[in-house]
Image (cartoon, rainbow, N blue to C red):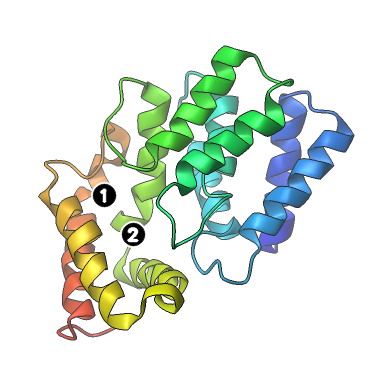
Amino acid sequence: MPAADAFAAEWHVLAQALNLSAALSESLLAELQAGYGHPARHYHNKKHIIAMLNGAAGLEFNDPDMARLAIVFHDVIYDPTRSDNEHRSADLLKDRLASQITPDRLIKAAGIIAATAGHQPSDDHDTNLVLDLDMAILGQPWPAYLSYAQGVMAEYMPHIGDAAWRQGRSSLFIDPTLAREDIFITEHFKPLEIQARENLRHEKAWLSGNAPSA
């Protein structure tokens, strides 16, 4: 199934669970499709969201609908030149659904989105699961990881250039992630830890020209 169709199908199931009107559901779907379908989205696109939703299907959340809602909205605003994308995405969610979802649940979903900015362990079980889902690509086999890394590179390179990307990717993401005691927060994702560290080290070598690209 094409990503656009799969994304729409997932959204319609969620919108029905949230009791959204047909008009609001379609309006939000159009907005989400426009964001994730932008041609500059090489990784942070509908495929990324679908992969997270598929992974979420096998997990036990305290509030599954708010976790899924957070997943759907967490990268809807994505501008590589800004550092507040997650908070802007959370604000968009609150603005669009303020009259549809109770304040406590809306705060929960927005909080999960905001947490994806720093990926630090939370006291909230659902937040930790979503954070690990977002990072699960790090623990996939190298070809899948390389495709992810190249996608993110393609999103940033037009704005900052090759040299700045390579330096920044290593110093701002790879090194801090490797320095963490645990990359993954929840027990469910712990089996990905070893592969994730291997991939990160391999990418750092690849960025410096010291490793094959496949």
Compared to residue 11, the image places residue 19 above or below, namely above
| Residue type at the position of mark 2 | Gln
How packed is label 2: few (under 14 Cα within 10 Å), some, or many (20 or more)?
Answer: some
Q: Earlier in the sequence, mark 2 or mark 1?
A: 2
How packed is label 1: few (under 14 Cα within 10 Å), some, or many (20 or more)?
Answer: some
- Residue at the location (16% across, 76% down)? 205
Q: Left or right: where does residue 15 sit relative to residue 69? A: right
In this orientation, which residue lies closer to the viewer: 129 or 73? 73
Note whether residue 195 is visible: no
Instruction: State the image coordinates of residue 88 (x, y, percent, origin top left).
Output: 53, 42
In this orientation, which residue lies closer to the viewer: 127 or 95? 95
> Regarding mark 2 in the picture, which secondary structure is present there?
loop
Specify the quadrant that holds the C terminus.
bottom left
Compared to residue 146, the image places residue 107 above or below, namely above
Instruction: State the image coordinates of residue 184 (x, y, percent, origin top left).
Output: 25, 41
**Contact check, label 2 and label 1, Cβ < 8 Å:** yes
In this orientation, which residue lies closer to the viewer: 98 or 6? 98
* Circle on res. 192: 1
Q: Which residue is mark 2?
A: 140
